[in-house]
Amino acid sequence: MNDTFLRACRGEEVSYTPVWLMRQAGRYLPQYQSVRANVDFLTLCKTPELAAQVTLQPVDILKVDAAILFSDILIPVEAMGMRLEFSDKEGPVLSEPIRSRASVDRLSIPDTEEDMPFILATIRILKKELDNKVPLIGFSGAPFTLATYMIEGGTSKNFLHTKKMIFQNPRLFDFLLEKITATIVPYLSAQIKAGAQAIQLFDTWAGMLTPVDYKNFVLPYVKKAIAELKKEGVPIIYFVNDCAGILKEIKKAGADVFGIDWRIDIGDAIKKLGKKVVVQGNLDPCALFLPREMIEERVKDILWKGEYAKGHIFNLGHGVLPETPVENVIAMVEAVHKFGQKQ
Ligand code: CP3
């Protein structure tokens, strides 16, 4: 197996900078679209043969150095007892958002084997299929980001309901976050036991808080989750979107790798986190709409700056956009492999 990605996660020496992309499986790939034409998104996530098939597509097409399980961060939320739907226009919709003690009480702490068996079945198929290729990344939403979906009922602009709960009923918020943390730790342990070789925690919305609110209402739970998961012995990547203003706090989460979005120069992020860290990122997803030579220039700049960290895994600063030309994504991966060689 090509273990360059895992070695980079651990800060070990590598012969080149590995690369994978958030949302590397998805609508920009015609091969994904043709699978998706016959099934809705949730059915795709819950059908192990199909989920495994679309997980493998970017490995074969893009030649990336890691695969990421095809699923969604809201799958465990549904397993906790909320009704989940995906609409083409609005994205995810969770009916009856969590706003009261009674609604938190009604949530269950799911058992992965029993309530989400398709996740483990998908990983077991991938384990076989990927045997001689690249490592498999498992994932979950981080506690805060999952809480925002549960409290807002979907995606939000200003996260008013979430912030209202934090400010007006911090005990209820704590109660909810404890329950989410108690869900995702065994969920991720089960993914690791089934064969996931690294884990990424997505904290997509944690950058919406002030640094002090991040410290008080996000960090304790993610730190706890990471500390418990560390016992499993696989690298833990923590991605926070819009992380620039809170890097000092994010560092305390104790992850092995820190995922950086594109709004900060990766060199500055490394300075703030300290040279002993491993970073992942951070090409602007829209840079994939540039001409090829300009994509290469941006790739080189990030690779060069990444050299200052203990380790660097190349990635986008957030997920691939559905409109992205596939040939540009391939060109980007080729550029990383070409210019990321170490002498
Ligand atoms: O990265 C990968 O290739 C693995 C698969 C993956 C998906 N979602 C597939 C998906 C992963 C890791 C996720 C995580 C996820 N899901 C996050 C965190 C990462 C991020 O983007 O910030 C979040 C916030 C979600 C919730 C979610 N799922 C939203 C807001 C949406 C709608 C927006 C959109 O892009 O359509 C989804 C749907 C979704 N998740 C799709 C895919 C491929 C599109 C579904 C389709 O085929 O119509």
Image (spheres, rainbow, N blue to C red):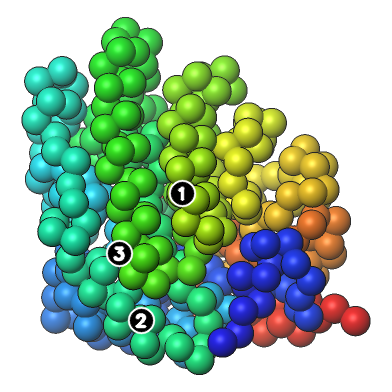
Query: Which secondary structure, mark 1?
Result: helix
Task: Point out the frontmost of discs 1 and 3.
Answer: 1
**On residue 41, which mark appears?**
none
In the shown orientation, is residue 343 left or right of residue 286?
right
The residue labelled by disc 1 is 229
Mark 2 sits on what residue? Answer: 126
Q: Quadrant of the C terminus?
A: bottom right
Distance between mark 2 and mark 1 Cα atoms: 21 Å
Q: In this picture, is 61 found above or below 278?
A: below
Helix, strand or loop status at disc 2:
helix
User: What amino acid is labelled 1 in the image?
Assistant: Leu
Is the C-beta of the residue carrying label 3 under 8 Å from the nearest atom of ligand 1? yes
Q: Which residue is drawn at 56% across and 71% down?
A: 20
- x then y, percent, for residue 239: 54, 49
According to the image, label 3 marks what residue? 71
Query: Which residue is most to the right?
Result: 343
Q: Which amino acid does label 3 sit on?
A: Ser
Q: Is residue 227 visible?
A: yes
Please tell me which of labels 2 and 3 falls first in the chain: 3
**Quadrant including the N terminus:** bottom right
* Label pair 2/1, CB-CB below 8 angstroms: no
For ligand 1, give the image quadrant: bottom left
Q: In front: 126, or 233?
A: 233
Identified at 85% across, 78% down, the residue is 342
